[in-house]
Image (cartoon, rainbow, N blue to C red):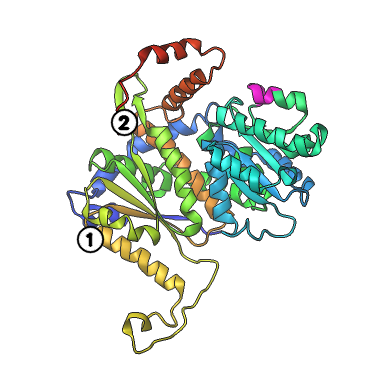
């Protein structure tokens, strides 16, 4: 299996100029810090960072595959009920590894996949209007077991299935992924007897895609989950190397940190030149933003650190964002996601040979045009003095996607060491959740509700 490649040529001063680019000396100076950061992160793999060992949980993978096999052909649809880290990875795996038109024409005995990652009443209501719950398996995912969005969806769809087929039969339409012992969802599993899977301790939501959080729904819709975890294991092995210039995760983390802190590039654009990888960029955006965007350092100092992730898709966003990227502020750096070999060969027909504006396209392939557009963007960014790197894979398959996901996860963990923040908590998210619980009248949050009501806020100004 081919290894993915991280080409950082165009982040260097030789390519984009000394004012914008990094020097070899700057990167070399990160070698010691990177070695220490890697040691400190890997030392926690059997403690509170157990996501590092997810590629080796073969017993869990065997149970997932056995469950998927046991329900094969029984359901027309799988609906993931989750949000954030309980949804973004599922979507990224589906769009990367299944056909873009999977839900229109799925393979025999393979269900469609819907990831309901929002509680917008129009999204949920339209699903109820168009999809029969009695033909659907609902995969309820919440590590805490108390996520308001997920639990409200669970209550809605549980009742919808019961209304159609009765309470006893409805139990087979629900599979739960949650904490092993704690949380209301685990209690409900015990009461109802639902099939369930475990999110292990030490596996936070945004680092959970290689756990049952991402693997259950993937196995149900025919994705090669064994290839996925083997790819992640291959990247793990590669990234245990403490040498900066031989470890792509260390190098990616060092480049990101230096471009932000030394070259004033606080915005990290993940520019996917592959339709299949567009949602991988979405998944990475949460991983980066929620891990590194912190008010406090690990010592408690107020620092307000963190890069801002931006997602772009080639060639679509060449016609909507690249104008800003090449001529706007020098506050961004770019990671292009590139694929050498697409699955399809599509040849452009020859016609209008007397019109040069179209004649040159005849007989060429869409691969040639697509890659020329990608390389053109890379050249334009470089000539405009915009640092850019390229993460390349030979083909999009389970093995390369597993590599990419593990690389990004480890890179972000290393960035936490460089930025001196806790990459594994999310207090800003929790603050919003607590306010929502208070506004919804949840028991135990009365004091917070009183604070909100007493504050009043500014008088509304509405036009």
Please identify the residue farthest to the left as the structure is shown.
19
Where residue 423 sits in the image (x, y, percent)? 42, 31
Q: Is residue 368 above or below residue 146?
A: below
- Label 2 Cα crowd, 10 Å radius (few <14 / some 14-19 / many 20+): few
Q: Is residue 267 left or right of residue 210?
A: left
Image point (34%, 89%), residue name: 354
> Residue 427 sits in which quadrant?
top left
Q: Is residue 295 left or right of residue 220?
A: left
Residue 18 numbered tag: none
Q: Is residue 186 magenta?
A: yes
Q: In this orientation, which residue lies closer to the viewer: 163 or 343?
A: 163
Q: Secondary structure at mark 2?
A: loop
Q: Quadrant of the N terminus?
A: bottom right
Where residue 438 sits in the image (x, y, percent)? 49, 18
Q: In this orientation, which residue lies closer to the viewer: 86 or 137?
A: 137
Q: Which residues are magenta?
A: 180-187
Taking the image as drawn, is residue 46 in sight?
no
Q: Nearer the viewer, mark 1 or mark 2?
A: 2
Measure how far apart labels 1 and 2 are at the Cα level. Answer: 46 Å
Where residue 386 sits in the image (x, y, percent)? 25, 53
Residue 383 numbered tag: 1
Residue bearing mark 2: 462
Q: Is residue 462 left or right of residue 134?
A: left
Q: Is residue 66 above or below residue 3?
A: above
């Amino acid at each position: 299996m081919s290894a993915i490649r991280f080409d950082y040529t165009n982040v260097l001063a030789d390519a984009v100029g000394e004012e914008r680019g990094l020097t070899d000396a700057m990167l070399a100076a990160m070698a010691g810090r990177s070695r220490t950061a890697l040691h400190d992160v890997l030392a926690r793999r059997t403690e509170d960072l157990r996501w590092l060992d997810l590629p080796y949980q073969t017993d869990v993978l065997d149970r997932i595959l056995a469950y998927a096999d046991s329900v094969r052909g029984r359901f027309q649809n799988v609906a993931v009920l989750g949000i954030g880290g309980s949804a973004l990875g599922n979507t990224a795996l589906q769009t990367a590894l299944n056909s873009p038109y999977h839900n229109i024409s799925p393979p025999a005995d393979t269900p469609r996949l819907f990831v309901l990652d929002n509680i917008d009443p129009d999204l949920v209501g339209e699903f109820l209007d168009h999809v029969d719950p009695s033909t659907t398996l609902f995969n309820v995912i919440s590590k805490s077991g108390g996520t308001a969005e997920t639990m409200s969806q669970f209550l809605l769809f549980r009742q919808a299935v019961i209304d159609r087929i009765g309470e006893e039969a409805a139990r087979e339409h629900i599979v739960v992924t949650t904490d092993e012992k704690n949380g209301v969802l685990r209690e409900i599993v015990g009461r109802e007897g639902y099939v369930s899977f475990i999110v292990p301790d030490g596996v936070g939501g945004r680092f959970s895609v290689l756990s049952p959080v991402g693997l259950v729904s993937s196995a149900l819709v025919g994705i090669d989950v064994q290839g996925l975890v083997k790819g992640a294991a291959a990247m793990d092995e590669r990234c245990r190397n403490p040498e900066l210039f031989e470890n792509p995760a260390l190098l990616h983390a060092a480049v990101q940190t230096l471009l932000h802190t030394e070259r004033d590039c606080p915005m990290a654009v993940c520019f996917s030149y592959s339709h299949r990888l567009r949602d991988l960029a979405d998944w990475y955006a949460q991983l980066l933003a929620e891990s590194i965007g912190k008010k406090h350092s690990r010592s408690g100092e107020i620092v307000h650190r963190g890069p801002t992730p931006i997602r772009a898709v080639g060639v679509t966003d060449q016609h909507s964002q690249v104008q800003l990227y090449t001529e706007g502020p020098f506050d961004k750096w770019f990671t292009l996601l590139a694929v050498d070999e697409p699955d399809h060969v599509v040849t452009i027909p020859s016609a209008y040979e007397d019109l040069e504006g179209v004649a040159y396209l005849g007989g060429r392939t869409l691969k040639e045009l697509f890659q020329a557009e990608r390389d053109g963007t890379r050249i334009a960014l470089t000539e405009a003095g915009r640092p850019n790197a390229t993460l390349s894979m030979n083909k999009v398959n389970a093995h390369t996607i597993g590599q990419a996901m593990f690389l990004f996860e480890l890179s972000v963990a290393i960035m936490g060491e460089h930025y001196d923040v806790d990459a594994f908590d999310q207090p800003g998210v929790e603050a919003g959740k607590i306010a929502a619980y208070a506004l919804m009248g949840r028991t135990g949050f009365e004091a917070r509700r009183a604070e909100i009501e007493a504050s009043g806020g500014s008088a509304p100004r509405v036009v």
